Amino acid sequence: MVLFLFVLMLLNLNNEMEPETSRIGVISALVAGGTLFLVLITALRDSFQYGKGYTMVKVPEAGLVENLGKLLFSKYLVPFEISSILFIAAMVGAVLLAKREKQVID
Amino acid sequence: MEQLNNIGASLDFYIFVSIALFSIGAIGVLTRKNMIVLLMCIELMLNAVNLLLVTFSTFFGNGEAQIFVFFIIVVAAAEATIGLSILIMAYRNSKSIDIEMFNKLNG
């Protein structure tokens, strides 16, 4: 979120730069999104009858930082390290992409 | 701690909020043409999934889903970084943040 704010600050936008959207596109998008919402809600309502048998497991320690850390550094150690590589790649890519240089598309 | 684990009765509310967030994100992606808002809506959909994962993780007393949430957050952060840097580059080249600008890439 901080990143978004920085970009908003960098870009020096104003009101007439806001791209206008066509009305028919907005209406069809709203219909599609509303249909998605209704389908998901209906699926949720249907799933209640199958979920009756489940009761909540009382494991209060499951979400604690200590247990999460133990899990993260034992079973999920390899994905953790790979995600650090992903972060470095993203950082280098972002710097390379956003570096100021002379290039004109048209 | 008791409070944390008392969500069993209201599991459907969490799912409802998650579905609502996801739908709002999807509608935003379909509706808006501003690239910044598009990226924010993608983040919103990812966070809806995160909310669902944490809810079920707490419900079933299994911490592994929260590890997945960590990884989703990491990937979302990397994706937002790359997306915003692409946005900055596109803005520098065309002085516009309209998503239609990328139609110029069409050969």
Image (cartoon, helix red, strand yellow):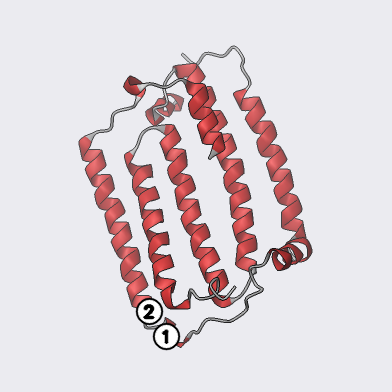
Q: For mark 2, what is the residue?
A: A48
Alpha-carbon distance for marks 1 and 2? 7 Å
Chain name for mark 1 = A
Q: For mark 1, what is the residue?
A: A52
Question: Is B19 placed above or below B74 here?
Answer: below
Question: Is B58 placed above or below B75 here?
Answer: below
Residue beneath the point at 66% across and 74% down: A61
Residue beneath the point at 49% across and 84% down: A54
Which residue is the extreme one toward the bottom? A53
Inspect the image, locate mark 2, and give the three-letter code of the amino acid beneath it: Phe
Mark 2: secondary structure: loop
Which one is in front, B21 or A98? B21
Residue beneath the point at 36% across and 33% down: B33
Q: Position of residue B61 (x, y in %)?
A: 60, 76
Quarter of the rendering containing residue B96: top left
Q: Position of residue A48 (x, y in %)?
A: 37, 79
